Image (cartoon, grey):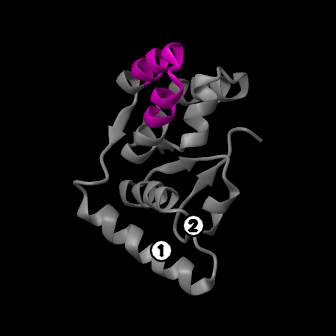
Amino acid sequence: MSYILDTNIVTAILKRNEKIQARLDRAYQNNRELFISGITYYEIKRGLLATNATRQLADFERLCRSYRVVSVLNEIEILERAATIHAELKRRGTPLEDADILIAATAIVQGLILVSHDSDMLRVPGVTVEDWLL
């Protein structure tokens, strides 16, 4: 199985978290593909630009050359799944932020395991979540 990395995991990579690096190394050894959602790309890039974090921007650019960025906007199936997730969570009274829903929908539609340190992602029906920071 391949993985899609949530924003909080990419942030941990940029902060050079040893626990995450060990899990990434294990994923590579097991020939697992790693992806980043276009939403995560946007969230990380805007934050780094806003704080003028030049070293982390360079690290992020290198990271994006290593992992494929999965576009959300050109994938109607992802947008459809996200709308369904949003409606279901809202009916339950447990809504999530749109960015989180889009990232989770991307994982589901692409058949990827979502690596996230956000326990709220566990509320999304149909998503498989692993927390590499535990």
User: At 64% across and 23% down in the image, what residue appears?
Assistant: 15
User: At 41% across and 17% down in the image, what residue appears?
Assistant: 62
Magenta part of the protein: which range?
45-63
Picture quadrant of residue 7: top right
Residue 37: give x, y in percent of width and height.
41, 45
| Kind of residue at badge 1 | His
Quickly name the residue at label 2: 96
Determine the secondary structure under disc 1: helix
Mark drawn on residue 57: none
User: At 51% across and 81% down in the image, what residue appears?
Assistant: 88
| Kind of residue at badge 2 | Leu
User: Few, some or many C-alpha atoms within 10 Å of disc 1 (few <14, some 14-19, many ≥20)?
Assistant: many
In this view, the residue in front, 20 or 62, is 62
Residue that protrudes farthest toward the bottom in the picture: 91
Residue 8: give x, y in percent of width and height.
61, 41
Is residue 124 shown in magenta? no
Whether residue 106 is situated above or below residue 48 in the rendered picture: below
Mark drawn on residue 86: 1
Residue 45: give x, y in percent of width and height.
44, 32
